[in-house]
């Protein structure tokens, strides 16, 4: 998935009843966070590995982190629990969406094998063009449209109480 990660975070937060504030911000950040590995991929490793092999795209890493962090946050920083849950949920959604036409190490740390639901053949001169002209782009467009409709129908902020 290339275009719809940020919209998917918006849809997630809205479905969770969090139309604004820190939970929404956390969902938006989590929805794009795994792709920050592209900075490392291009600038440090010079594209030596598929960027889905970095820990930020490994569900097992996030599962371990969630199992350790969520009880601690619940006990010691409860007001950050909802934003953290939104962030982690959006990260998992990112990884699920990447599985459609990308490839993910779903069994890491037990296996490094990459799993994808659909293989996108290299039909164009650049891989991005191949993805953008494949039928799976319809899923991206649907998510973008869904997010846009939710945004246009977003609830108004609550009025401050009058004195
Ligand atoms: Zn990704």
Image (spheres, helix red, strand yellow):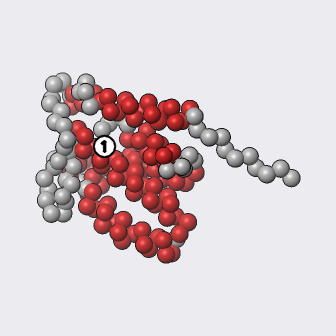
- Which residue is pictured at 32% across the width and 33% down the height? 139
Residue at 55% x, 66% y is 79
The quarter in which the N terminus is drawn is top left
Q: Residue at x 16, y 25 (%)?
A: 123
- Residue that appears at 76% across and 49% down: 160
Q: Is mark 1 within 8 Å of ligand 1?
A: yes
Taking the view exactly as shown, the residue that stands out farthest to the right is 163
From the viewer's perspective, is 144 left or right of 156?
left
Q: Is residue 117 left or right of residue 13?
A: left
Give the percent coordinates (x, y) of residue 115.
Answer: 17, 47
Which corner quadrant of the image does residue 128 belong to? top left
Q: Secondary structure at mark 1?
A: helix
In-front residue for pair 73/17:
17
Position of residue 149 relative to residue 12, above or below, is: above
What residue would you read off at disc 1?
A: 97
Could you tell me if residue 33 is visible in this image? no
């Amino acid at each position: 998935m290339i275009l719809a990660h940020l919209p998917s975070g918006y849809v997630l937060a809205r479905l969770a009843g969090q139309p604004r504030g820190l939970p929404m911000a956390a969902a938006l950040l989590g929805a794009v966070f795994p792709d920050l590995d592209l900075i490392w991929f291009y600038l440090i490793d010079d594209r030596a590995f598929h960027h889905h092999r970095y820990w930020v795209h490994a569900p097992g890493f996030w599962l371990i982190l969630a199992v350790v962090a969520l009880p601690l946050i619940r006990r010691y920083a409860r007001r950050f629990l909802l934003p953290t849950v939104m962030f982690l949920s959006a990260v998992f959604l990112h990884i699920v969406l990447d599985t459609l036409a990308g490839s993910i190490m779903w069994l890491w740390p037990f296996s490094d094998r990459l799993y994808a639901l659909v293989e996108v053949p290299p039909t164009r001169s650049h891989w991005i063009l191949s993805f953008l002209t494949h039928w799976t782009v319809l899923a991206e467009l649907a998510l973008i449209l869904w997010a846009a409709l939710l945004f246009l129908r977003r609830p108004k902020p609550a009025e401050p109480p009058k004195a």
